[in-house]
Amino acid sequence: MPRLSICINTQTPLVQFRGVAGGSLLDPAQAESVELDRLREGVDYRFSPGGVTRMVYPLVKRLLKDRVLSEAHWVSLNPNAPPTVGIGRLTLHNVRIDSDRMAGYGAVKEAIWGRIHDLDPTERHDDLFWTEAFSEYAYYNRATAELIRRLDEAHDFDAFYVHDFQQMPVGHMLSTLKPKIFRWHIPFEVSAIPDQWRAMLRTYLDAYDVVVVSARRYAESLGLLSPKGRVLQMYPYLDPADYSRPGPAAVAEVSARFGLAPDDEVILVVARMDPMKGQDVAIRALAEIADRHPNAKLVLVGNGSFSGSAAGLGLSKAQVWRQQLEGLVAEKGLGGRVVFTGHVGQDELDGLYERCRFTVLPSVREGFGLVAVESWVHGKPAIVTQRAGVAELIRDGVHGFLFDPDDPGELARKMDRLLGARGGGLRPRLVRNGRALARKCSLDAAIENERSLLTEVAEA
């Protein structure tokens, strides 16, 4: 079978550059092209956090290693980066748009995000696709599609793999009959979509040969919209090899950095600062059990998304949400009991997973929830919102605990149960069964499906 050449498209870039102000010798605004192996991770650049890049990069590496792919190109929004970045046979291509257009694009992206996640039922944005801001959203997608078209002329791709709602119009804008796959990473509940949006969404999705979603219920809901292409459900995944189990010295170091005493019982939440992620639910739950568990500490890991970073759209949502959370901590009398770490590197994150008693995924809505899988990989129990895609894999009390994010008291009771589990079989059972689920959401389990999907559409 001949090897394939593919083009991947995401909004969030694989790599974010720090620039000279961050101590780097690289000025990404001036460089035309760089090879990543000549730069220093943590000084010149960092890999973007988040589930999409965490999943896609290991996939590309494996497909290149297994010689399924001859080359891969990855197009993303990255205004503060060189136009191209080389990582072996993977080439990153960075889209830049003028700052005056970024605000309109960001406003539309956030409106779609909020409506799909049903964050504010009173703000439906029914006329979104007819607003002036939408022209900037369309402009960004057109700029992306034009770059992909030029790359296709040079490399003659066999298939295009487009990821998530920000890039949805790209397939429609690509004037090619070559196969296109679209992966929808956030929740899909057709009932949350305004009637006025549905024809436009269907037009965009009809441009793809296959639409992939993360959970069975999303596939059923998407079927009600009746896109022309095939709808495929495939669980997201990660590569366990990307995670390590740090030793006692490394765990002690990260604990000291964030003020965690040896007898603190750490409850870990790993999520960007966003109201949809439900950190406030975890704070309210801790307040209910704080007196019974005086050593319990809630550690909130995460900063804003790429959109909210200086390297991205520069939106302030994350900062505003953190300030609200800090106010809630003060209101509940939890000073010193809730730790905000901001962004941490992978080594520190591994240390915090090792340090914690269990993790909580408290999202109001969650497309899937790979952080639960990360928890299982680290051998830690997870308490998971019922509204995450991963919840359909979990039997309450068998693989982990489930709770309604509208009921902080239910979360408090399950946190209380895990904090009180000193012996017996509860924790070992949850860890054992959680690890079994983690194997279902591993790159090894998914690689054959991804390989088959790409070869099938390329040969159709």
Image: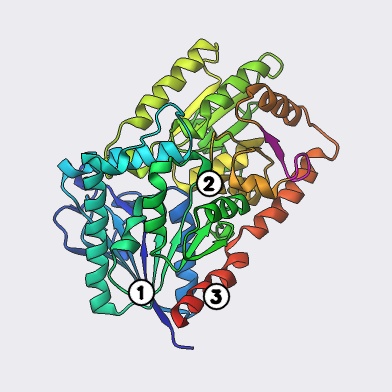
Q: Which residue is mark 2?
A: 367
Give residue 219's mark: none
Image check: 267 left or right of 192? right
How far across and down, in percent of the image, does residue 337 sit? 56, 20
Residue located beneath label 1 in the image: 89
Q: Pointers 3 and 2 in contact (CB under 8 A)?
A: no
Residue 135 magenta: no
Amino acid type, mark 2: Gly
User: Quick one: SS at disc 2?
Assistant: loop
Instruction: Between label 3 and label 1, give the one nearer the viewer.
Output: 3
Q: For marks 3 and 2, give the CA distance.
A: 23 Å
The answer to whether the residue labelled 2 contacts the one labelled 1, judged by CB atoms less than 8 Å apart, is no
First to last magenta residue range: 395-403
| Res 295 → quadrant | top right
Q: CA distance from mark 3 to mark 1?
A: 21 Å
Q: Is residue 402 located in the magenta-colored stretch of the structure?
A: yes
Q: Height in image: 242 above or below 424?
A: below
Lower position in the chain sequence, tag 3 or tag 2: 2
* The label number, if any, that marks residue 452 in the structure image: 3
